[in-house]
Image (spheres, grey):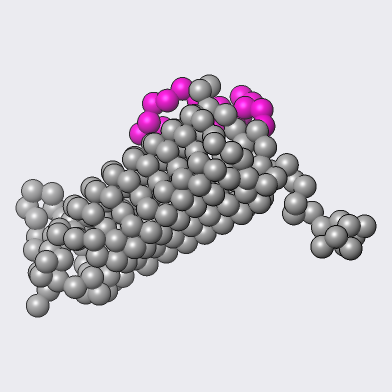
Amino acid sequence: MAAVTGDSVTSAVAVDLAETSVRWLNAELHNPTASRYRVLAPRGAHAIAAGLRGEVTVDVYGHAGYYCAGMNDGGTVTVHGSVGVGVAENMMSGTVRVRGDASQSAGATGHGGLLVVEGNASMRCGISMKGIDIVVGGDVGAMSAFMAQAGRLVVCGDAGDGLGDSIYEARLYVRGAVKTLGADCVEKPLLPRHREELAGLLAAAGLDHDPAEFRRYGSARTLYHFAAHNSAAY
């Protein structure tokens, strides 16, 4: 029996995962009977709120496991805790906010939407991102934005080794120190249009840093253009 109760205070449906399975929760969210849900006692369960389609709002009170809010397409998910590997993996649209920290591969392969990690994100944040916007309030680990193809990654703290390795056309903004840049990733001028873009991303994330404090990084474009006269070297 599913533990679903109406919440008279927040007008949200409460789902207690101490009594209800994640499978039941996700089936309900895929064909929602309400516009807002509160998920209680997540206890690190995997794939919470995965595969949302449409403008449903989900608040998760506690820590979530792997692939929380994965494949999100239009939903608004807030995790009032930390998350495991692959939060918002392959997101198409919508918003995912993590009040705590995120493990590896946050926002991996995302095509759109906004992922906000208010704490730190571990290795490979934004790996192979394809249009998603990611704002991290703290630091990111090594190999973040590896093979990032499109979208924006904003790091308000420091970045680890190999930032932007093999990057395509994603734009990276870092406020703190960058330990090392990856192959073909270079620092670029922070022009007025980039400050404006960055200000918009910070505002969307609810952060008030001065865009002038950031540096911009992107592709030197020496790796991904095939040159026939270099074919013998490939």
Q: Is residue 62 left or right of residue 229?
A: left
Q: Is residue 204 above or below residue 34?
A: above
Which quarter of the figure has residue 48? Answer: bottom left
Q: Is residue 101 left or right of residue 162?
A: left
The answer to whether one can see residue 212 in this image is yes
**Residue 60 percent coordinates (x, y):** 22, 54
Name the residue nearer the viewer: 183 or 66: 183
**Region of the chain picked out in magenta, as a range:** 188-211
Number of labels in the image equals 0
The residue under the point 47% across, 34% down is 158
Residue reaching furthest to the right: 229
**Residue 136 percent coordinates (x, y):** 42, 40
Q: Taken as a whole, is the magenta stretch helix, strand or loop?
A: helix
Say which quadrant the N terminus sits in: bottom left
The residue under the point 32% across, 66% down is 47
Which quarter of the figure has residue 15? Answer: bottom left
Name the residue nearer the viewer: 13 or 1: 1
Q: Is residue 231 left or right of residue 93?
A: right
Q: Is residue 135 above or below residue 73?
A: above
The residue under the point 19% across, 73% down is 21
The answer to whether one can see residue 75 in this image is no
The residue under the point 46% across, 22% down is 210
- Give yes or no for residue 48 being in the magenta stretch: no
- Give yes or no for residue 207 being in the magenta stretch: yes
Say which quadrant the C terminus sits in: bottom right
Q: Is residue 132 above or below residue 14?
A: above
